[in-house]
């Protein structure tokens, strides 16, 4: 998301780490040789030129000299001059102006390089040379951060600050080893700037914080921190001060250009602003960029578990978010112009949400204060006696109404007694008389009221995107190719990031939820645009039919009299509804919720005028199936504005034809084509005119099924209940529930790209609690690893932590138990080779390569057997002797004992044909043991074969458990699936292949491994077994052939078959066994009860 503000003409722009020209080669740089670079730099670039170079780079009036900076970066100025300067920097030179100039120059060049270089090219990418020297890195960072305290309102001040924030964000995300140095500036030292009374209150609450603060004070060292000056500068920028000019009234940088006439576009270059106006506009633009980037960086820091506790405490103590919500920028009337600032602030506020019990404790303390000091003050009496749940509720507005009736003096006293307000702090702007009352109310409300929980927000949030989300450039932004070059590399997007560490599992899942939703919305938008364009909507009035040209000319829309919307074209993935959508079921809300339990509707499709190819698309190939996601749209040609898409900003040089923005990236597309509503739904069933359910799996697999009747199809769908509730109360659509009557087209998507709803529902269920709670789904030892705050080695099967977990947890394999390796080893020799240097005891017989026993042993061990093996590791190592003990194990000084037990190899199966190496056997052992196993290797090293062996061994070791295989592609999963089947020891009826890749499976099996195929197999097996029950019943005379169905099907069901077994089969077996015990000599054939079923004559003994 950015580096510098502009690039020289002809230079490539950044787009997701790639050049704008897909054919251009990637720029790569080798890490500098820091050992002798200093000497070379002094010869070619004397230190005295650094300040002059910095002056030249900032010599332009309104912006940095990007052409010069790009040239310096290309010539290796960082490696040859700037970095050697910091390598040789002495302590007394750190405060020199030349050092600060060198630090800022290095910052500019780092941002330029980061826009070209992939972070995966080497360790750290852009910042790889920082790894060579920590003191030099610290010197650069200290000098760079000092500029954030710059109080000058010069032309380049905000542009430079934006560059600093950008490079700090890139450093924090790409180089974790050095980002710790940055995080130290946002550590416990921030407690010094927390107001004294508030700090004392928090130290009494948190013992760990009190302990760290005590260590910091006793050390006697003062850690620098840039946060205080930086945060105060931000408050000045948003208008909470008098240092900077107001931002109110200026517009945010446009994501796309407005739809002006061609003549206006050609005159754009002629109407140039005066130098003074251009300078003022540039300062405002970079001031706004600086504000957005700073808020984004604050969100990143609050998302890190390392910096969150201290930064959250400091920002809470100075009421940072409250000040921003009261700032002139936020309260201005130009809400749309400052939409990005507002959305970033809302995201920032979510970082301060605490547990509900914390707000309840605060409300209880407030009641005690009121009872002690204001028990006779009427406006607060209701608060004193109310329940804490009612006080902290935002929906009831109970506490807010009580504060509205309080006097200013009482509000101020409450804030003082709760230790929320002090005099000499960063929010002194709001302690002025004209701001006091509103500020005190906001502070108390923010302190007491509990915001909605994440689960509540997700439960009321629609899963399907609507027209408001799809074409909102701030939610679903266009590609960087179509963003104005003025802001292309510094554009801030309010999107969650998948960092290297997370606060908790809820934080991680919420980020994934939002990213999956936005990613799917981007693809859905493109599919809807393509379908609507192909449908070619027109407005057909009573007087005439509108003529439209969609290829190159504008669409002219005229509205005279009444009329309807018609479609002149057709689309393979879209159809017009034959009749309006009809709501069928609206279930009442479940207990504890406010949205309907379910909402079902039905619409009709008519295929009479569709060709055979189009019918097959909807009937057979990728047709409508149960659980498919569809999108219903309202296209109203009467409100179409027509016209072409806006032109791409700066898409060409002068005297060249400008290109329009692609329709899928155009935010004005709904207005141009009359799209007024988009609603998602899920298919429940599809019926023909005879009422036959065509989406029923049993119908699809029935070979003798009758063809569907008629051309009409009745589609029953489940609507999004949360979206229906929003439409009902008017927040979703201005039409209310009438929006569903206006839907006139249906759009479907390919199944491989339309599975977003299941993913979103799974994440929401994990966060909702209950049996699918995330804390019950993930073991305790794995959570720190997934959150990025734990030691990965602690999840290994060899770690003491994992051994203790396995011993104490029921159902987990004991670390001392024998593991069933199955057919991993081809023979006894292979078993011995797999554990080199170990003492092996096979079937209580020690295996030694004695010369006298070699021939006999080898001959005996050539027989194929399966093995259970236990590896007895040496005693647990301590930190003091771990290294020495590992060397002794490798040298064989400390032998490892291996106990193996053989059992017969099953006949009739292929088994494992691979002679695994000791390293691969070690990976198999890790996969069978409790813990996390990661197998890494280049292609052709047997990773898939090892995975298949682990799967087979787990299947035999835990026959009642389910094993789930997840891969990055269908081809990889099919490869695993086919190799497991080729072994022959895993029953095919227990194998299920999910997803569309089942069609590409290359197996000799006659079974269908899809969900439908598995159901069909079970139904077929059911019919076979019930036929046996029917024949057995008829042979016993319990039932006759007349009781069969019309088609000859058995009269028994699974339930009645159970009763038949209990009352007739088991009864006869017991009587047969009793007769055998009563008589010594008996003719078994004469008393056998099932002779007729087995075709035995009466005289057979």
Image (spheres, helix red, strand yellow):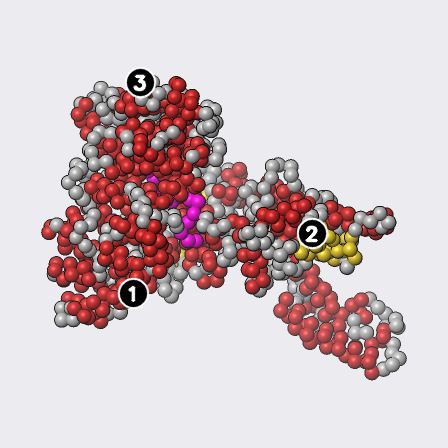
Q: What kind of secondary structure does the magenta stretch mostly adopt? A: loop
List the residue tagged with mark 2.
895
Between residue 770 and residue 196, name the one nearer to us.
Answer: 196
Q: Helix, strand or loop at disc 2?
A: loop
Q: Are marks 1 and 2 in contact (CB under 8 Å)?
A: no
List the residue tagged with mark 3.
654
Residue at the extreme left? 433
Q: Helix, strand or loop at disc 1?
A: helix
Residue under the point 16% across and 68% down: 373
List the residue tagged with mark 1.
361
The magenta span reads 487-505
Q: Are marks 1 and 3 in contact (CB under 8 Å)?
A: no
Q: Helix, strand or loop at disc 3?
A: loop
Q: Quadrant of residue 255?
A: top left
Per the model, the C-alpha gap separating discs 1 and 2 is 59 Å
| Spot occupied by residue 214 in the image (x, y as percentages of width and height) | 33, 55
């Amino acid at each position: 998301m950015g580096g510098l503000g502009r690039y020289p003409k002809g230079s490539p722009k950044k787009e997701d780490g790639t050049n704008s020209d897909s054919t251009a080669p990637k720029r790569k740089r080798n890490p500098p040789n820091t050992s002798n670079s200093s000497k070379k730099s002094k010869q070619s670039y004397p230190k005295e030129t650094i300040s002059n170079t910095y002056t030249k780079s900032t010599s332009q009036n309104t912006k940095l000299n990007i052409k010069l900076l790009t040239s310096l970066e290309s010539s290796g100025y960082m490696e040859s001059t700037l970095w050697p300067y910091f390598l040789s920097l002495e302590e007394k030179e750190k405060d020199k102006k030349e050092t600060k100039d060198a630090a800022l120059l290095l910052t500019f060049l780092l941002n330029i390089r980061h826009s070209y270089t992939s972070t995966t090219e080497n360790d750290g990418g852009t910042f790889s040379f920082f790894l060579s020297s920590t003191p030099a890195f610290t010197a650069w960072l200290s000098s760079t951060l000092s500029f954030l305290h710059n109080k000058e309102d010069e032309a380049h001040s905000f542009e430079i600050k934006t560059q600093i924030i950008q490079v700090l964000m890139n450093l924090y995300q790409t180089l974790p080893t050095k980002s710790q140095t940055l995080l130290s500036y946002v550590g416990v030292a921030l407690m010094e700037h927390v107001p004294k009374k508030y700090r004392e209150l928090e130290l009494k609450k948190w013992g760990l914080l009190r302990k760290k603060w005590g260590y910091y004070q006793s050390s006697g060292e003062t850690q620098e921190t840039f946060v205080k000056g930086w945060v105060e500068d931000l408050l000045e920028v948003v208008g909470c001060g008098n240092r900077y000019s107001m931002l109110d009234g200026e517009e945010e940088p446009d994501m796309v250009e407005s739809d002006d006439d061609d003549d206006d576009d050609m005159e754009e270059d002629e109407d140039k602003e005066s130098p003074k106006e251009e300078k003022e506009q540039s300062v405002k633009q970079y001031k706004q960029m600086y504000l957005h980037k700073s808020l984004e960086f604050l969100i990143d820091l609050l998302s890190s578990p390392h910096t969150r506790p201290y930064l959250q405490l400091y920002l809470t103590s100075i009421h940072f978010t409250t000040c921003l919500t009261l700032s002139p920028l936020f309260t201005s009337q130009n809400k749309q112009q400052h939409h990005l600032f507002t959305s970033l602030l809302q995201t920032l506020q979510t970082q301060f949400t605490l547990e509900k019990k914390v707000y309840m404790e605060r409300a209880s303390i407030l009641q005690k204060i009121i009872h002690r000091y204001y028990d006779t003050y009427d406006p607060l009496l209701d608060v004193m006696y109310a329940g804490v749940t009612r006080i902290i509720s935002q929906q009831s507005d109970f506490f807010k109404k009580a504060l509205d009736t309080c006097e200013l003096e009482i509000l101020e006293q409450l804030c003082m007694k709760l230790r929320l307000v002090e005099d000499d702090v960063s929010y002194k702007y709001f302690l002025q008389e004209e701001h006091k009352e509103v500020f005190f109310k906001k502070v108390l409300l923010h302190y007491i009221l509990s915001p909605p929980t994440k689960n509540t927000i997700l439960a009321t949030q629609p899963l399907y995107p609507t027209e408001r989300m799809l074409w909102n450039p701030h939610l679903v932004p266009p590609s960087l190719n179509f963003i104005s070059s003025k802001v292309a590399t510094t554009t801030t997007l309010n999107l969650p990031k998948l960092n290297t560490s997370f606060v908790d599992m809820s934080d991680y899942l919420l980020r994934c939820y939002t990213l999956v939703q936005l990613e799917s919305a981007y693809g859905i938008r493109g599919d809807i645009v393509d379908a609507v364009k192909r449908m070619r909507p027109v407005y057909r009035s009573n007087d005439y039919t509108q003529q439209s040209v969609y290829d190159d000319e504008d669409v002219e829309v005229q509205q005279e009299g009444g009329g309807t919307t018609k479609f002149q074209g057709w689309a393979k993935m879209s159809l017009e509804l034959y009749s309006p959508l009809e709501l069928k079921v609206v279930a009442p809300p479940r207990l504890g919720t406010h949205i309907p339990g379910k909402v079902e509707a039905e619409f009709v499709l008519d295929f009479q005028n569709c060709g055979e190819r189009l019918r097959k698309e909807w009937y057979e190939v990728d047709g409508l199936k149960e659980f498919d996601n569809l999108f219903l749209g309202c296209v109203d040609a009467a409100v179409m504005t027509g016209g072409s898409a806006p032109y791409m900003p700066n898409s060409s040089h002068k005297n060249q034809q400008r290109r329009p923005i692609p329709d899928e990236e155009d935010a004005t597309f709904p207005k141009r084509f009359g799209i007024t509503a988009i609603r998602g739904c899920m298919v429940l069933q599809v019926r023909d005119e005879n009422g036959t359910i065509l989406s029923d799996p049993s119908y699809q697999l029935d070979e003798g099924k009758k063809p569907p009747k008629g051309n009409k199809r009745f589609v029953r769908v489940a609507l999004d209940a949360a979206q229906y509730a929003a439409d009902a109360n008017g927040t979703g659509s201005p039409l209310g529930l009438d929006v569903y009557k206006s839907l006139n087209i249906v759009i479907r998507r390919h199944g491989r790209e339309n599975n977003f709803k299941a993913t979103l529902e799974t994440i929401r269920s994990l966060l909702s609690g209950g049996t699918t709670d995330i804390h019950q789904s993930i073991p305790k030892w794995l959570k720190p690893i997934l959150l990025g705050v734990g030691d990965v080695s602690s999840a290994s099967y060899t770690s003491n932590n994992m051994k203790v977990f396995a011993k104490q947890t029921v159902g987990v394999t004991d670390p001392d138990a024998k593991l069933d390796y199955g057919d991993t080893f081809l023979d006894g020799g292979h078993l011995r080779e797999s554990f080199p240097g170990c003492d092996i005891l096979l079937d209580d017989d020690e295996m030694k390569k004695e010369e006298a026993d070699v021939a006999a042993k080898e001959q005996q061990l050539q027989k194929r057997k399966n093995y259970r093996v236990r590896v007895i590791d040496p005693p647990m190592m301590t930190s003091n002797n771990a290294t020495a003990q590992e060397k002794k194990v490798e040298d064989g000084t400390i032998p490892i004992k291996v106990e193996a037990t053989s059992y017969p190899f099953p006949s009739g199966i292929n088994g494992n044909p691979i002679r695994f190496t000791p390293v691969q056997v070690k990976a198999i052992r890790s996969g069978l043991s409790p813990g996390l196993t990661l197998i890494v290797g280049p292609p052709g090293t047997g990773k898939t074969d090892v995975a298949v062996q682990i799967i087979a061994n787990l299947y035999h070791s835990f026959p009642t458990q389910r094993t789930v295989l997840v891969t990055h592609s269908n081809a990889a999963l099919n490869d695993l699936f086919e190799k497991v089947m080729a072994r022959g020891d895993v029953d095919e009826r227990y194998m299920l292949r999910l997803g569309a890749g089942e069609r590409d499976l290359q197996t000799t099996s006659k079974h269908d491994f899809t969900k439908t195929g598995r159901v069909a197999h079970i139904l077929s097996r059911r019919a076979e077994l019930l036929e046996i029950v029917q024949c057995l019943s008829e042979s016993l005379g319990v039932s006759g052939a007349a009781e069969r169905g019309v088609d000859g099907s058995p009269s028994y069901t699974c339930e009645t078959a159970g009763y038949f077994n209990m009352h007739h089969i088991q009864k006869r077996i017991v009587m047969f066994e009793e007769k055998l015990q009563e008589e010594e000599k008996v003719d078994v054939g004469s008393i056998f009860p099932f002779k007729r079923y087995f075709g035995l004559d009466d005289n057979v003994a």
